[in-house]
Image: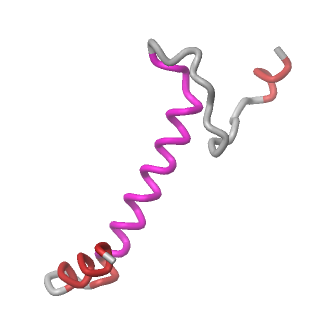
Amino acid sequence: MLLSSHLIAVAGQFPTYFVIVYVVGFIAAVTIGSIAWYNSKRPAGWENVKRPDIIPDMESEEESKS
């Protein structure tokens, strides 16, 4: 696996847990950022694009009553 061989190569310079924390943090940031982007107001040209099924709908109670 490419990721594990890269972690081993980098682990020679840095502690392995240090690299793992950054990898997990990067994946979390991308995931949270993607969910926030899909739940934000659509950019120009994306107004009529259907939301992917894996992205949860985060409407507030006020928005759902309207």
Give the color scheme: rainbow, by chain, secondary structure or one colour: secondary structure
Q: What residue occupies the far right of the structure in this picture?
A: 65
Image location of residue 5, percent across then percent down:
25, 81
Name the residue: 29% across, 84% down: 16
Q: Quadrant of residue 51?
A: top right
Please give left or right for residue 60 compared with residue 27 in the image: right
Image location of residue 48, percent across then percent down:
59, 15
Towards the viewer: 49 or 44: 49
Name the residue: 49% across, 41% down: 34
Image location of residue 32, percent across then percent down:
51, 48
Please give left or right for residue 26 compared with residue 11 in the image: right
Image location of residue 2, percent across then percent down:
29, 74
Magenta span covers which residues? 19-43
Vertical relation: 47 (above or below) 33? above
Name the residue: 14% across, 82% down: 13
Q: Quadrant of the image for the C terminus? A: top right
